[in-house]
Amino acid sequence: MDISGQASLFIAVGGLLLFSLLVNTIGQRTALPRVTLLLLLGVAVGEQGLNILPDSLSTRFDIIADVALLMVGFLMGGKLTIKELRSNGRHVLWISLCGAIVTAIVVTLVCVLIGVSPVVALLLGAIASATAPAAIYDVIQESHFAGPYTETLLAIVATDDAWALLLFGLCIAVSSLLNGHAADASVYRVMWDIGGAIFLGLAIGLPASYLTGRIKRGQPSLIEAMGCVLLCGGLAQYLEVSFLISAMIMGACITNLARHHDYPFHAIEDIEWPFMVLFFVLAGASIQLDGLASVGLLGLVYILARTAGKWLGAYVGAVISQAPLVTRHWLGIALLPQAGVGIGLALAASKYFPEHQHTLLTIIVSTTVFFELAGPILTKLSLSRARAQGLA
């Protein structure tokens, strides 16, 4: 990198971090969450807007996104305490399971009804079940709410993508059979993605729960925390398993087994926000607004069906688990943000069914614009409703 490139990188990062302070202030005073504001900032400074982001920063989006998501996974795993699962475990299980399954069914059936091929409809249904943990987690952090509603929401989001991966594997297998192909490879791939991730999270989390926090009694150092997170992420990518699930399992292990820790996650929380700022701004810069014009009827149907499916699924799960009324009516819309996991599943599906690549990627990438911008607003609205009932 030459001097000018390095200078532009430093200026861009410094400017975005300082500007995030203003964004945070606006988010606290308006109904717009800072996630949406940062995404809009990214659109403004990216190729769709002023096009002033240096290439030296844009080309680092993948590594920044991975580090940010690893931290989110680690911190969300820290919310999965045995005490919390004992008190809200029934709600978490039923709402997350019904939210994923009902969404997949609704999207699949609606797509078939408008003439979409069963293969594409099944794949879109499975992809629709996934959520965006980073956006939802940040809205909760920004709200500073702490109650049964937010704890339940965090736990649901932490398990949601595992259900999405299982549904995706099942739909890939069924779609392969419909196309006359063998389904064994796709099922094995998904089982390894989840099972291998759980094993890796345990393999790092179990020893880390004992070894960390020994240098400074009761408080893991930043080096220890970042070392565990980055080691987990690197090994997950090397083994080709879900690094988000690995980080969650690792975080859950440490928070439940490290009895000598006062609070094992504060070190990560101290440096998480700068990565999140860059992650959301660069995500906004990569949004292609002109793609919205090309989604047509199928894109609109996907948005409406996924929204209805998430709400209905959460409602059914909440009724079965006898959750409070505010949870039944409002938690579903808090699960609407969708980003990286959905796009990743669309890319994976395109490899299995290249003949449907254009349709899958066009719909998922384009509708992600809506769900990433509007989703956090609805999540914040959901939290506000719960707070009014004294549950957030």
Image: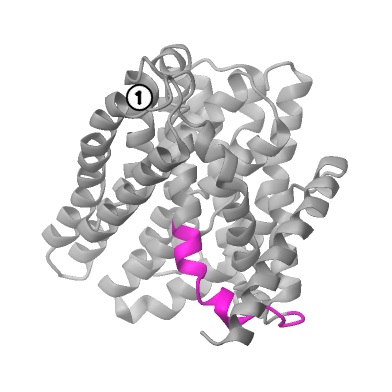
Could you say where residue 367 lies in the image, as x and y percent from the top left? 59, 65
**166 up-or-down from 292: above or below:** above
Q: Is residue 164 left or right of residue 292?
A: left
User: Is residue 58 one of those drawn in magenta?
Assistant: yes
Q: Is residue 49 left or right of residue 338?
A: right
Residue beneath the point at 15% across and 54% down: 188
Kindly indicate the quadrant of the structure image that contains residue 282: bottom right
* Secondary structure at numbered mark 1: loop
Which residue in the rendered view is the most extreme toward the right? Answer: 29
Q: Is residue 257 visible?
A: yes
In magenta, the rendered stretch is 49-66
**56 up-or-down from 251: above or below:** below
Kindly indicate the quadrant of the structure image that contains residue 355: bottom left
Residue beneath the point at 78% across and 59% down: 19
> Mark 1 sits on what residue?
214
Between 325 and 345, the one nearer to me in the picture? 345
Between 336 and 262, the one nearer to me in the picture? 262
Residue beneath the point at 27% across and 53% down: 236
